[in-house]
């Protein structure tokens, strides 16, 4: 089992709690991940600059996962 420090576990629980309460936000963030991975896997079909588009969607998804850590409760 991977050992995480107390701070990382606290951050993970905060993100998980936010996603439980906001199902549509959770869905949107994970759709962004899926689209980003899909573009990277099917790069010939994505048109011009597939790595840029895939990276853009994955970056947006990463920021979406970090957003719950920045809000005050």
Image (tube, helix red, strand yellow):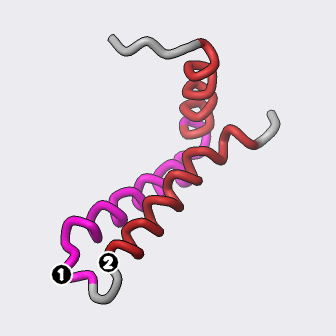
Q: Secondary structure at mark 1?
A: helix
The image quadrant of residue 8 is top right
Q: Is residue 25 above or below residue 9?
A: below
Q: How far is mark 2 from mark 1, CA to CA?
A: 8 Å
Residue 52 in the figure: left or right of residue 14: left
Q: Position of residue 30 (x, y in %)?
A: 42, 53
Decide which of 27, 42 is in the foreground and name it. Answer: 42
- Within 10 Å of disc 2 (Cα), the crowding (few <14, some 14-19, many 20+) is some
Extreme residue toward the bottom, this view: 48
Quadrant housing residue 44 = bottom left
Q: Which numbered disc covers residue 61?
A: none
51 sits to left or right of 23? left
* Residue 50, numbered label: 2
Residue at image coords 63%, 29% = 14
Q: Is residue 71 magenta?
A: no
Q: Residue at x 55, y 27 (%)?
A: 12
Residue drawn at (44%, 59%) of the image = 58
Secondary structure mostly taken by the magenta-highlighted segment of the chain: helix
Magenta region: 20-46
Query: Mark 1 highlights which residue?
Result: 44
Q: Residue 16, position in %: x, y?
A: 54, 32
Q: Nearer the viewer, residue 65 or 2?
A: 2
For the residues bearing labels 2 and 1, Cβ distance under 8 angstroms: yes
- Which residue occupies 80% across, 33% down? 73
Q: How many numbered marks does the figure carry?
A: 2
Q: Note whether 40 is above or below 9 in the view shown.
A: below
């Amino acid at each position: 089992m991977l050992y995480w420090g107390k701070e990382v576990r606290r951050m993970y629980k905060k993100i998980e709690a936010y996603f439980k309460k906001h199902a549509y936000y959770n869905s949107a963030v994970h759709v962004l991940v899926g689209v980003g991975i899909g573009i990277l896997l099917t790069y010939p079909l994505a048109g011009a600059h597939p790595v840029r588009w895939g990276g853009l969607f994955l970056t947006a998804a990463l920021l979406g996962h970090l957003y719950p850590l920045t809000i005050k409760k």
